[in-house]
Every structure is written in structure tokens, then in C-alpha cells.
Image (cartoon, rainbow, N blue to C red):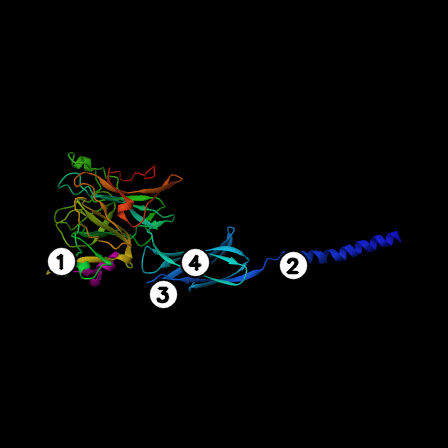
Amino acid sequence: MKKFFHYAMLLTIAMVTPLFVACDDDEEKVPEYTLTVEMVLPEGIDASNVSSLVVEAVKNLAGEVKTVEGLTATFTLPQGSYDISVTGDVKDDVTASLKGAGKVDLYADATVKVELAVVYESPILFKSIYCAGGKAGYTQDTYFELVNNSDEVQYLDQLVLMYCSAGQKAPNAWQANGVTDIYYQAQGPVVAFPGNGTDYPLQPGQSVVIANDATNHQEADPEGIHSDLSGADWEIYLDYSKMGDVDYDAPNLTAIFYNNEYMRAFALGFFNGAYILAKLPVTPDAYAADETSFSTTPGTTSTTLNMGIPSKYVLDAVEAWDRDDADHYPVFLPKDDAKATWAPVGWSGQCLRRKVAKIEDGRAYYKDTNNSFEDFLTDQPQTPGVTPTAVD
């Protein structure tokens, strides 16, 4: 009897145990609910002009990410509190992106609206600009330095450099006629990098020096205050110049258009200046072949053509003006450069240098608020190619 009872008890336990396990699984299952994220575009941005919207719902560092075509994303998620983030691109502006964030307690089906804002941020920036001149009349020693301020590889191919008139005390002729979102060149050339799109990579944190003349200007003009630019990465060679220009060893940016053949240097901003770096929707040569890319000066009888580049193609814009001028009217829209900085003293041999915002693992990240007055230091020594070691 005892033996029979023992086997019966074991059989009963074996049959009952799975029932208890199944019951525990049902009790531990976390309820799931539907989360709908509706994105609200900022004023002036149309849905047809938006691409690559990515919506992320995260709880405790885990969650779900979706790339969506429209302005709504739907998730099925376990209950809990979620952080919502949204990013996207604006198709027709090279520096514009969309960002938004929100929170939701998901303990029933819920809909959350996330308002998106436009953020203007360029992956490639002017790191330093030297145009002040080290000796009156010596124009060949100017240089520009560009830096990849992003965490991804960028490409110099087909990027455009243009010098705009600066030092204005009133709206210029185009602004006075209602054209505020297109910037027009001053006298001289508009130049561009060569390449087919991926020929000239710029690694994260890497910078390049572009010299007007890639030579040692200390030897060329011992009486001036100049740098040795013989090691420059690029130079601007003006093969058309009636004043003569020497082609040194560095690879050349090419002039895609010029309106004064008697200049032998690019961007002669000795006392003030306005500079743009642009990425066009077509090749620079194709842009220069399109007659709609040009304008004569409104309100004048001048027949000289000036190339215009719309704000939406501008990667970076920097304006510097004479600190002795009390009155100043900006060249650029606030989205590109909200306030000009002081130009270095003319013929001082000093430059503009962008401030360092932070240094991580030995790499400098540069300040970029689209405000030259906040982003740049003036009257700085020439240090082409030098990597900063401290935060400004």
C-alpha cells in the first residue's frame, strides 16, 4: 500500500507541475499597446521637402527604430515609459535637418505628437581664414582652412568657394531689390574643387589648407609677416590672370567663373570680408553654364555678371567687418551667419580662427552656432594645419 501510494503521489505531482508553470508564464507576460507618433513639421517646411524621417522609441536603452515615409509612425510595444526622438533631412537645403523629441507613458493605446524644429549644421566648416595681408600690396599669401567637423567621412569634391562683397552699411543692390536668399560674388573668381563625388575624402576631424599660392612666403617677401605655405594641401591657381599667377606643386582648385581678369589672388578681404563654402545640386561647371546662375547689379547700368549662390546651397558662411565701422548691414541671412565678427587688423599678418568647443580623445570639435561673432577668434597668429590642444 505504501509503495502504491508513493507512486501515485509522484504521478500526481508530475501531472500538476506543468499546470503551475503555464499559469506563471501567463501572469508574467507584459501587456503590449499601440503607440502612434505623429510628427508636426515647422512652419515653411512642406512634407514633400522632407526625407529620411527616423523615429525611435526607447525604454531603458532598449526600444525600436523605424524609418518612415510619411509623418506618422506606429509601434507595438510593451507597456512602460518611452523617450521618443525624431530626425530627418530637408531635401533642398544642404545644412538643414529636422529634430524633435517627446515622452509617453504607454499603459494603453496612445498617440503622441512630436513637434519638429529645423537645425542648421554643416559637416564641413571654415576652420581659419587668413586674408588680412602681412604687408601692404602683397596678396599671394592668403589661405583658407577647412575641417570635417562631423563624425562621418565627407568629400571635398565639387565644393565651391566664393567671396562676397562685405563692409556694407546698407542693404546691397540685390537685398534692396528683395533678393535676400541669394548671395552674389564680389570681383574676382568663384573656385571649386575637382572630383567626381568621392575622389577627395576628408576624414572626421581632418582639415586641409587651401593657399592662394602654395609656396614659402617668408622667402618670397622677407619684409612681411607671412607663413610657409609650401606644404599646403591645395592652391587656387588663376590661369587666366592678366597679372600672372604661378602654378606651384599643390593640386589646384579651378575657377569656374571670373569677372575680373586683372586679379591674381582669390578673396582680397584685407579689412573686411564675406566668404561662403557651398555644395551645388549640379556640377560646378554645369552651374556656371546656366545663365540663370548670374545677375548684373540691379539698379545700375553695369553689364558685369556676378554669380549668385542661393542660401540653401551654403554649407558655411563667415563674415568679418572693420571694427572701426559703427554702421554695418549683414551680408548673410541669420540662418547662415547671424552676426559678423571683427576682421583682423589690415596688413597685420593675423587671421580668423574658429573656436574649439570640445576635445575628445585628442580630436577637436569646433564651435558652430552660425554666428561668426560667437564662433571665431580674431587677430590670431597664422597656424595653418595646426591642431588645437585646448578648448577656447
* Membership of 285 in magenta stretch: yes
Q: Quadrant of the C terminus?
A: top left
Residue furthest left in the image: 301
Q: Could you tell me the amino acid type at mark 4?
A: Val
Q: Could you tell me the amino acid type at mark 3?
A: Ser
From the viewer's side, name the closer residue of 109 and 157: 109
Q: Could you tell me the amino acid type at mark 2?
A: Asp
User: What residue is disc 3 on?
Assistant: 48
Kind of element beneath mark 4: strand
User: What residue is disc 2 on?
Assistant: 26
Please say if the residues under marks 1 and 3 sit with CB atoms less than 8 Å apart.
no
Residue 304's label in the rendered image is 1
Kind of element beneath mark 2: helix
> Which of disc 1 and disc 4 is earlier in sequence?
4
> Which of disc 1 and disc 2 is earlier in sequence?
2
From the viewer's side, name the closer residue of 286 and 152: 152
Q: Residues within 10 Å of mark 4 (few under 14, many from 20)?
A: some
Residues drawn in magenta? 284-296
Residue 110: percent from the left, percent from the top? Answer: 50, 62
Q: CA distance from mark 2 to mark 4?
A: 34 Å
Q: CA distance from mark 2 to mark 3?
A: 46 Å
> Which of disc 3 and disc 2 is earlier in sequence?
2
Q: CA distance from mark 1 to mark 3?
A: 37 Å
Q: Nearer the viewer, mark 4 or mark 1?
A: 4
Q: Quadrant of residue 388?
A: top left
> Which of disc 4 and disc 3 is earlier in sequence?
3
Residue 197 drawn above or below residue 362: below
User: What residue is disc 4 on?
Assistant: 54
